[in-house]
Amino acid sequence: MRASQTLFSRGFFGRSMDELRRRTQIAVSFEAIKGATQPKPLYEFNTADSVRDCIVMTDKTIGGFSESNFDFHKSTDINNDPKIPSAYARFHGNISTRLPSDRPNIQRTGFAGFRSPDQRPTAFGRSMWDIDPYIYLALRVKFTSTSIIP
């Protein structure tokens, strides 16, 4: 039997200090009044761990047949173009609208997705993404048009 990790580990204090630093910066810069002055990356896929921690979902949870993968890739750009990230995540798979034969109550299937992991608690409680000062959300997405339309 393995003993459980104590709540007050270095990770807990580190997250608490990051949250204190973030809240102090908001107060000192009057961000709550003026609004945000710079972009805020909510989640970056720059390490294999950041991709592995994401939660991948498909309709298999309700008996569907869709499949999805979420993989980490390092950029192969040898020119070090600043427009191309040094690492990225690739979400891919197959969507199936086939209905499970043993579950007549299921009338629609065919979905896949991913989400970021829940933020871990700090001394200030559970962290949330504070996007109130921002007026829009921008996503950087690249896709191949041939695989979108059947």
Image (cartoon, rainbow, N blue to C red):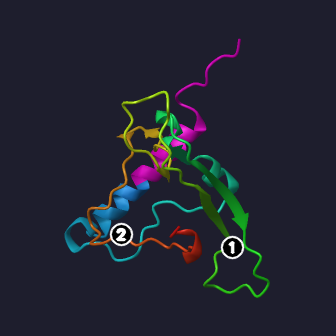
Q: Amino acid at mark 2?
A: Leu
Residue 120 place in picture, x, y as percent:
48, 40
- x 42%, y 50%: residue: 19
The residue that label 2 is drawn on is: 137
Of 21 and 98, nearer the camera is: 98
> Which residue is depicted at the point 47% across and 50% down?
111
Identify the element where label 1 is drawn: loop
Q: Residues within 10 Å of mark 2 (few under 14, many from 20)?
A: few
| Magenta-colored span | 1-20
| Disc 2, SS | loop
Query: Would residue 35 appear left or right of 41 to someone viewing this image?
Result: left
Q: Residue furthest left?
A: 33
- What residue lies at 50% left-to-right and 45% top-to-bottom? 98
* Frontmost residue, 102 versus 76: 102
Which is more toward the observer, 105 or 29? 105
Q: Quadrant of the N terminus?
A: top right
Q: Is residue 26 visible?
A: yes
**Amino acid type of the residue tagged 1 in the rendering:** Ser
> x and y percent of residue 45 in the render?
60, 61
Q: In the picture, residue 121 is in which quadrant?
A: top left
The location of residue 15, given as percent across then percent down, is: 50, 46
Q: Is residue 98 magenta?
A: no
Q: Is residue 42 above or below residue 65?
A: below
Q: Examine the rendered structure and indicate whether residue 130 appears above or below residue 118.
A: below
Q: Is residue 13 magenta?
A: yes
Q: Is residue 29 above or below residue 97?
A: below
With respect to residue 140, does 72 lie above or below? above
Residue 23 falls in image quadrant: bottom left
Residue 1: which numbered mark, if any?
A: none
**Which residue bears the numbered disc 1?**
86
Q: So how many labels did they put on this image?
A: 2
